[in-house]
Amino acid sequence: MLKINRIVIVSVLVFVQLALYAQNNTNSPATRYGYGELADRSFGAGRAMGGIGYGLRSSKQINPLNPASYTSIDSMSFIFDVGASGQVSWFTDGVGNQRNVNGNIEYIAMLFPVHKRVAVSLGILPYSYVGYNYGMSEKTGSSTYVNSFIGTGGLNDLYGGLSIELWKKRLSVGANFGYLFGTIEHAKYLAFTNNAYSGTEVQSVEVRDLKMDFGIQYTHPLSHTESFTVGVAYTPSNKLNATSYMYETLQTSVLETDTIRNQAFDLPNSFGAGISYTKQNKLTLAADVLYEDWSNARFFDSKDEFKNRVRVAAGTEYIPNFQHRSLIKRMRYRAGFHYSNSYLKIKDSSYNEYGASVGFGIPLLDNRSMVNISFEYVKVKPDSRPLLDEQYFRFTLNYTFNERWFFKFKVD
């Protein structure tokens, strides 16, 4: 047991460092705008079920989408969860095509009880990704020049969560207290091919601020093995502590540098709600809806960059026979779908996102720890031609270590 505990602790330290420095998990040109691509905050089972979580309660998974869910953990357990993902992306403008492959460690988290009705979760997960690299060649008179656009970075959420069970096995409330940090950088490079003229324009936004999420879940038992759960989560709007930097160069000379500290960067009010039906160790059905009030959020002092976002998702998990000797029958089979519109306004245009996912939960020998695998196809459809048509095939792998750390054995 001590050896296993040490392995988990070392893994936490290693993955924290990797998560801090490896943020790029996208190649979308759309991440040139706003905070970039908003990350999927669901873990494990929820990821394969369309990204649901507001009404999901499971003693075997960590669910940061609704901090009220933390009290679903067994009072004798400790859960450690780490996830990584990779994706193949295709982009087309109707004439040309481009394919990219990339991946990254996504999140780490742990969950443990501190009282029979109180549980705590700690972790780090992404809030947004920025990553693109494209260029175009143009002519002016007899000269040819190349414009290149490169974006990197994103925002991360380092959180600590607390959940309290107010009514035994019925009503729980919870909160996440997070530290939002990261740097988003956009660079434009101009180079003429027939002379040595070149120029660079770089703009970056550095964020260091606190973030809070609140949640509540109510579970109503339908029978000894069946229950119905309703969950609600709320994230209040936040004026971020952000600093903007800009500099321009011509050849090797710096033309201008500027640090701007008083421009407003906001996060929106966010409201999430979900329901789930669970038949213990057999079947789960769940659905979520999310509404984010981005139209009132400022970006570089402007309220014209964003629009309100709605996301809906539904999913299911099925276990053929929880206690069967066959691994195939003990596995958890999952599927889901989701739809959302973009929060971005891009040259008075926007896009919608459609996704479908399938996945498996593979129990290990102790039938407590689990390896979760999910496959997701996402179609990003723009509502006007200037935007690219995007498609993604995503693969997510996570390991959930579930151990009875607080169990005391009796010896006669």
Image (cartoon, rainbow, N blue to C red):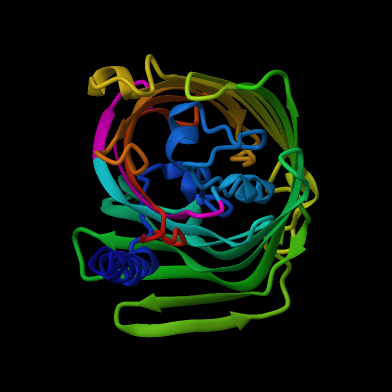
Question: For the C terminus, which image quadrant?
Answer: bottom left
Q: Nearer the viewer, residue 195 or 291?
A: 291
Q: Which residue is found at the position 23% from the left and 20% from the top?
A: 326
Query: Does 291 sit left or right of 76 as displayed?
Result: right
Residue at image x 31%, y 34%?
Answer: 363
The prevailing secondary structure element of the residues shown in magenta is: strand
| Residue 9 x, y percent position in the rendering | 33, 70
Residue 199: image location, x then y, percent: 35, 70
Q: Is residue 301 above or below residue 165?
A: below
- Furthest residue toward top: 320
Residue 276 lies within the magenta run: no
- Name the residue at 36% across, 55% down: 24
Q: Nearer the viewer, residue 312 or 117?
A: 117
| Span of residues in magenta | 75-100
Q: Nearer the viewer, residue 180 or 176?
A: 176
Residue 69, percent across and down? 64, 45
